[in-house]
Amino acid sequence: MKKEIHIWMNNSYPDNTHHDHLDLLKAIRSGEMVINTTCSNILNGGWIDMGYRMFLHTYGKKVFEINKKQVRI
């Protein structure tokens, strides 16, 4: 299973979603494979460098995979 971070911009996020930045960082440090969050400030290329695939779930309920070329480091 690959590591993934899902950033939710809508209210359709799953029950296990992290809303607090510190809680989110604990989940990353503990090695959770699939992380859901509403913290959009996590969107940066550093997590991609660490092996995470990043997905953005928009208000229009579309899902986009974010690659390193799309974010500033």
Image (cartoon, rainbow, N blue to C red):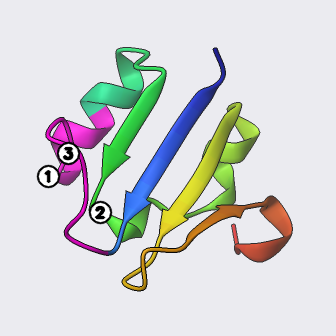
User: With 41 as the anchor, is 27 left or right in this view?
Assistant: left
Q: Is label 1 in a helix, a strand or a loop?
A: loop
User: Would you place residue 59 above or below residue 49 in this image?
Assistant: below
Magenta residues (range)? 10-25
Q: If you read the primary sequence from the N terminus, does the residue marked by circle 1 or circle 2 appear first?
A: 1
- Seen from the viewer's position, the closer of residues 73 and 71 is 71
Mark number for residue 18?
Answer: 3
Amino acid type at mark 3: His
- Do callouts 3 and 2 mark residues in contact (Cβ within 8 Å)? yes
- Crowd around label 3: few <14 · some 14–19 · many ≥20 (10 Å): many
- Do callouts 1 and 2 mark residues in contact (Cβ within 8 Å)? yes
Q: Where on the picture, by quarter, is residue 47?
A: top right
- Crowd around label 2: few <14 · some 14–19 · many ≥20 (10 Å): some
Residue sitting at 30 percent across and 52 percent down?
37
Q: Where on the picture, by quarter, is residue 29?
A: top left
User: Would you place residue 55 above or below residue 15 in this image?
Assistant: below
Residue sitting at 77 percent across and 75 percent down?
70
Q: Which residue is mark 1?
A: 20
Mark number for residue 39?
Answer: 2
